Image (spheres, rainbow, N blue to C red):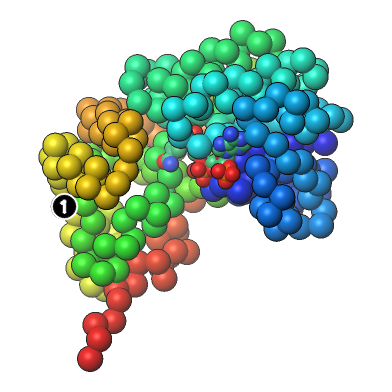
């Protein structure tokens, strides 16, 4: 039995879908009965919270393999450490951790939190595989498609450094392979796409796809801070995002790792394929007559 956490979220949901294709026995870990009620009949469900050890112990009953992902929140280290400790105590034989690109390399923001969890996992004695994904291609839909549709522009503080964006579907496919096949124990995989693009190049690709001009507007960090705080984003999250942008603008995001092909035996989903698959998200809004 494989326990997948974070199933109501982007990565965990995609991993669950991928595992269902391989006919694995899967249990999803949900925080609410309402969310669990949405699961397909062949998915077992467990209700609990990373902060509630008894709920983790119940969810791990009969489980040999675990996929662990948590939202990027300040409690991430505490919550994921709780899960790792529960896995150790229940004798879990394999844990695949969703970490982040930059863990072990950058001592601020989300990568720093993920580094602490990686160290705790390694020290726990639970057999592990660590996945360090780069920025998700789907972030472009989540964060930027609204103004791309309404204004033909998007705003960030990404500078001119290219990023090797990864498609979420590749992360899920790699995770499923590591959860169900031998040969990945002890490995740390850096998951990137096959090309690195600056935000200005992303804008060009979207323009080509939609046939309308899409501009990238680079904001100085102070302006981005003001804008995100104005939108009601909590200060810790604003600072974490600005620190992360500073890490990326320094250039490490151009790394193309080759680990997706190593695990899956195929190249990562190309950026243009991603754009094609999500084309409707970028279509300009029709102006009202
Ligand atoms: N976005 C990127 O480009 C990127 C790149 C590299 C790494 N990452 C990492 O990927 C992770 C985010 O993945 P995602 O996009 O799938 O996040 P997400 O959509 O926010 O999903 C997070 C999941 O964690 C669950 N969760 C949160 N707190 C919980 C708790 N106390 N107990 C049980 N479950 C809990 C959420 O459940 P609820 O639905 O109930 O809240 C949800 O299912 C972060 O760790 C981030 O640092 C992101």
- In the image, 219 versus 18, the foreground residue is 219
Residue 118: image location, x then y, percent: 54, 18
**Counting other residues with Cα less than 10 Å from the Cα at mark 1, is it few (<14), some (14-19), or many (20 or more)?**
some
- What residue lies at 54% left-to-right and 48% top-to-bottom? 10
Report the quarter where the N terminus lies.
top right
Q: Assess mark 1: CB under 8 A from ligand 1? A: no
Say which of 58 and 12 sits in front.
Answer: 58
Q: Quadrant of residue 261?
A: top right
Is 140 situated above or below 55?
below
Q: Residue 59's x, y, as percent? A: 78, 33
Task: Identify the residue at image location x=26%, y=62%.
Answer: 147
| Label 1 sits on residue | 217
Q: Is residue 254 above or below residue 85?
A: below
Q: Is residue 176 visible?
A: no
Q: Is residue 147 visible?
A: yes
> Is 46 left or right of 131, judged from the image as shown?
right
Q: Is residue 130 left or right of residue 232?
A: right
Point out residue 285 in the picture as x, y percentages from the top left corner. Answer: 30, 76
At a point 21% along the width and 67% down the height, the residue shown is: 151
Q: Nearer the viewer, residue 183 or 167?
A: 167
Can you name the residue that lies furthest to the bottom here? 289
Image x and y of residue 178, in percent: 67, 32
Q: Is residue 83 left or right of residue 180?
A: left
Q: Quadrant of the C terminus?
A: bottom left
Q: Report the number of discs.
A: 1
Q: Residue at x 35, y 26 (%)?
A: 109
| Disc 1 element | strand
């Amino acid at each position: 039995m494989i326990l997948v956490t974070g199933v109501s979220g982007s990565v965990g949901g995609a991993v669950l879908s991928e595992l269902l294709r391989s006919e694995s026995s899967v249990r999803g870990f949900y925080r609410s009965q309402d969310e669990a009620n949405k699961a397909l009949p062949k998915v077992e469900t467990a209700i609990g919270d990373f902060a509630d050890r008894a709920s983790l112990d119940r969810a791990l009953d009969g489980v040999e393999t675990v996929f662990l992902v948590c939202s990027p929140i300040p409690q991430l280290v505490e919550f994921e450490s709780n899960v790792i400790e529960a896995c150790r105590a229940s004798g879990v034989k394999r844990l695949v951790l969703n970490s982040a690109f930059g863990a072990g390399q950058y001592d601020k923001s989300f990568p720093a939190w993920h580094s602490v969890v990686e160290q705790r996992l390694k020290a726990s004695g639970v057999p592990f595989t660590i996945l360090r994904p780069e920025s998700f291609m789907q972030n472009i839909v989540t964060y930027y498609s609204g103004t791309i549709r309404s204004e033909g522009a998007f705003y960030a503080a990404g500078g001119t450094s290219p990023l090797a964006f990864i498609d979420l579907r590749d992360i899920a496919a790699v995770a499923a392979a590591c959860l169900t096949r031998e040969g990945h124990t002890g490995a740390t995989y850096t998951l990137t796409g096959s090309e690195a693009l600056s935000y200005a190049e992303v804008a060009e690709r979207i323009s080509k796809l939609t046939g309308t001009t899409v501009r990238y507007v680079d904001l100085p960090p102070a302006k981005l801070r003001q804008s995100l705080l104005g939108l009601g984003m909590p200060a810790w999250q604003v600072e974490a995002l600005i620190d992360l942008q500073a890490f990326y603008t320094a250039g490490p995001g151009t790394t193309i790792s080759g680990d997706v092909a190593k695990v899956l035996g195929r190249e990562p989903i190309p950026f243009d394929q991603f754009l094609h698959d999500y084309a409707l998200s970028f279509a300009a809004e029709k102006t009202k007559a």
